[in-house]
Image (cartoon, rainbow, N blue to C red):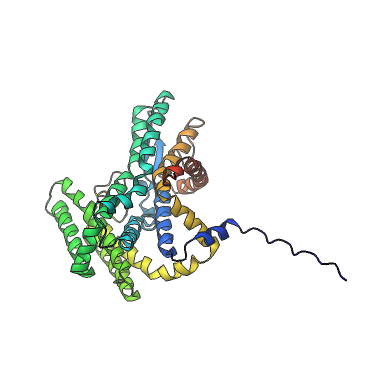
């Protein structure tokens, strides 16, 4: 008789396959893919259009290549992805909300993970700021660094507010309908802009659009969740209408073409959001809804899904710490050389963009190290 041999053991599945197998069957992977893309846009946007340059007095100050090179403005159209955050936020909030949920328990349940990493970030920067002072950095430099660290917190404040108000927003949407609800919020945003820009109203009134402006994509996310925006025709209309409205506002109403703030510019489309930024966000939402089915099919591939799943697991940590990663590399390089191209030099020439790209792997490595230290504070504790 021929000797028989045992079949070789199957090789253990790779990381991508294990992540794919561990994902709940009902998980909406297209939504997670949109969130991951939004996170990537924010991170790359800050790393590419925010520079910390050395001034004549030896201090670091923030600068933007968009101020000196407006030809790079289209980059802001790709990397300004905040509307996608609010679209996905409205979708997930509406999916998670039940009419019988108690008002007090809703925001606590939804906001715990969102806000969990914030205290650690603030606590970590107290000794870090002291260490930088001890190392000889000027107070002006430290002020510029801390300003960049704190800048993402406005997003969490607005996102958290809209999430906490989800029961009221869902009720408003159901009673009014998608088009009337969005039209009312758009009209409020337009009225604020009219008072601010057309009637020379006070600047502070513009901050009302921080809520009304981002409420628009949040409402669209709620409409997506209940099936109101299920058709490709509606998504195409949002894309075409948003693009046309944005172009008209920029060409005819004097709104900036850049969808991010540019140092030295009289008006920013983002701080606070203008009607042009809201129209642009509607176009982004329409495009997202058009590609969602294709995204869902793509996310069935384990190798495509794995990085998206990992990015979603550490979403808030990435969001909060990516600026610190960039600053860590910048300050560390400052101790070696004061003129690192693309890092400490003024972003006022086309070659700077290529020089900056070369630093992205260093920023990513620093962020990976910070994630290893900080991600545990995003996950709920296990007892």
Looking at the image, the residue that sits furthest to the right is 1
Which of the two residues, 338 or 89, is positioned nearer the viewer here?
A: 89
Number of marks in the image?
0
| Residue positioned 37% across, 65% down in the render | 288
Kindly indicate the quadrant of the structure image that contains residue 295: bottom left
Would you say 241 lies left or right of 72 here?
Answer: left
Which of the two residues, 11 or 299, is positioned nearer the viewer here?
A: 11
Kindly indicate the quadrant of the structure image that contains residue 228: bottom left
> Percent from the top left, x then y, of residue 265?
27, 47
Kindly indicate the quadrant of the structure image that contains residue 116: top left
Which quadrant of the rendered structure holds the N terminus?
A: bottom right
> Percent from the top left, x then y, of residue 343?
46, 40
> Percent from the top left, x then y, of residue 8?
74, 62
| Residue positioned 17% across, 63% down in the render | 184
Above or below, 266 relative to 229? above
Which of the two residues, 360 or 109, is positioned nearer the viewer here?
A: 109
Above or below, 160 relative to 253? above
Which quadrant of the rendered structure holds the C terminus?
A: top left
| Residue positioned 47% across, 57% down in the render | 308
Above or below, 217 relative to 231? above
| Residue positioned 28% across, 57% down in the render | 277
Q: Is residue 191 visible?
A: yes
Would you say 323 lies left or right of 176 here?
Answer: right
> Percent from the top left, x then y, of residue 65?
38, 47
Q: Is residue 261 visible?
A: no
């Amino acid at each position: 008789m021929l000797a028989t041999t045992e079949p070789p053991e199957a090789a253990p599945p790779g990381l991508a396959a294990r992540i794919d197998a561990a994902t709940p069957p009902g998980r909406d992977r297209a939504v997670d893919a949109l969130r991951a893309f939004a996170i990537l846009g924010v991170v790359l946007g800050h790393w590419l259009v925010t520079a910390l340059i050395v001034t004549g007095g030896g201090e670091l100050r923030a600068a933007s290549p968009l101020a000196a090179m407006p030809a790079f403005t289209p980059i802001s159209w790709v990397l300004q992805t905040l509307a996608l955050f609010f679209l996905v936020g409205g979708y997930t909030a509406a999916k998670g909300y039940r009419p019988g949920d108690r008002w007090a328990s809703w925001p606590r349940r939804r906001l715990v993970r969102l806000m969990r990493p914030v205290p650690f970030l603030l606590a970590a920067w107290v000794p870090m700021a002291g260490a930088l002072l001890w190392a000889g950095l000027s107070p002006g430099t430290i002020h510029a660094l801390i300003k960049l660290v704190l800048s993402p917190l406005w997003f969490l404040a607005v996102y958290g507010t809209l999430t906490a108000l989800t029961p009221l927003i869902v009720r408003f949407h159901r009673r009014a309908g998608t088009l009337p609800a969005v039209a009312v919020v758009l009209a409020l945003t337009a009225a604020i802009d009219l008072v601010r820009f057309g009637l020379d109203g006070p600047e502070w009134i513009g901050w009302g659009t921080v809520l009304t402006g981002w409420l628009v994509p949040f409402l669209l996310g709620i409409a997506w969740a209940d099936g109101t925006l299920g058709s490709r025709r509606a998504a195409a209309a949002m894309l075409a209408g948003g693009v046309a409205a944005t172009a008209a506002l920029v060409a005819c109403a004097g709104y900036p073409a850049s969808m991010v703030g540019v140092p030295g510019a009289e008006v920013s489309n983002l701080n606070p959001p203008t009607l042009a930024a809201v129209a642009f966000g509607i176009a982004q939402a329409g495009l997202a809804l058009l590609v969602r089915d294709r995204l869902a099919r793509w996310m069935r591939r384990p190798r495509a899904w794995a990085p998206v799943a990992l990015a979603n697991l550490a979403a808030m940590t990435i969001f909060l710490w990516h600026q610190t990663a960039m600053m860590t590399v910048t300050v560390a390089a400052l101790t070696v050389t004061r003129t690192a191209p693309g890092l400490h030099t003024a972003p006022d020439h086309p070659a700077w963009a290529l020089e900056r790209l070369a630093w992205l792997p260093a920023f990513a490595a620093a962020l990976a190290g910070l994630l290893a230290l900080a991600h545990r504070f995003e996950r709920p504790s296990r007892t």
